[in-house]
C-alpha cells in the first residue's frame, strides 16, 4: 500500500539575487527531485508516494541538500521515519 509522505522546506536566503538548489535523494543517493529556486523567503511543499513497508523500515531515509549557487555552501538534512507508542496516564486526587 502506498503512503503519502508530506514535508515542507522553508528557507530564509540571506544572499539576494542568488539561486538556491534543492536536491532530494534516497538512501542509495538516487536523485528523486531537484529544483532551482530564487527568492529571500522560500517555502516548498513536497509529496512523495512511498510504500508503507519502506516507510516503516529502519533503512528508510531521505537526504535533502540545499546549496547556494553563489557561495556553493551546502546544508544537508536527513529525513527518517520513526514510530513509537505513547501512553498517557492521568492522576487525580479523590
Image (spheres, rainbow, N blue to C red):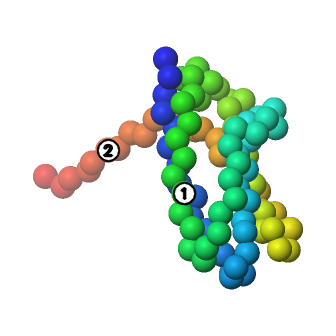
Where residue 53 sits, quadrant-wise, is top right
In the image, farthest residue toward the left: 94
Tell me the SS state at disc 2. Answer: loop
Q: Please state if 72 lies on the left or on the right of 50 as rendered.
A: right
- Residue 9 at x, y percent in the picture: 58, 58
According to the picture, the residue beneath numbered tag 1 turns out to be 44
Q: Please state if 52 lies on the left or on the right of 16 as rendered.
A: left
Q: Residue at x 49, y 17 (%)?
A: 1
In this orientation, does residue 69 appear?
yes
- Residue 19 at x, y percent in the picture: 72, 69
In this orientation, does residue 12 appear?
no
Q: Residue at x 18, y 55 (%)?
A: 93
- Which residue is more in the foreground, 48 or 94? 48
Q: Within 10 angstroms of label 1, few (less than 14), some, or many (20 or more) residues?
A: few
Check the image and report above or below for 70 versus 65: below
Cα distance, mark 2 to mark 1?
38 Å
Where residue 44 sits, quadrant-wise, is bottom right
Tell me the SS state at disc 1. Answer: strand
Disc 2 to disc 1: CB gap under 8 Å: no
- Which residue is more in the foreground, 5 or 47? 47
Q: Which mark is residue 5?
A: none
In the image, farthest residue toward the top: 1
Q: Residue at x 64, y 41 (%)?
A: 80
Check the image and report above or below for 27 versus 64: above
Q: Earlier in the sequence, mark 2 or mark 1?
A: 1
According to the picture, the residue beneath numbered tag 2 turns out to be 89
- Residue 94 at x, y percent in the picture: 13, 52
Amino acid at each position: 500500500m502506498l503512503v503519502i509522505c508530506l514535508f515542507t522546506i522553508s528557507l530564509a536566503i540571506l544572499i539576494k539575487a542568488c539561486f538556491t538548489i534543492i536536491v532530494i535523494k534516497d538512501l542509495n543517493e538516487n536523485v528523486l527531485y531537484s529544483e532551482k529556486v530564487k527568492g529571500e523567503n522560500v517555502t516548498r511543499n513536497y509529496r512523495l508516494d512511498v510504500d508503507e513497508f519502506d516507510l516503516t523500515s529502519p533503512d528508510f531515509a531521505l537526504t535533502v541538500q540545499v546549496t547556494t549557487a553563489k557561495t556553493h555552501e551546502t546544508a544537508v538534512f536527513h529525513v527518517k521515519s520513526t514510530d513509537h507508542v505513547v501512553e498517557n496516564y492521568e492522576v487525580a486526587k479523590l
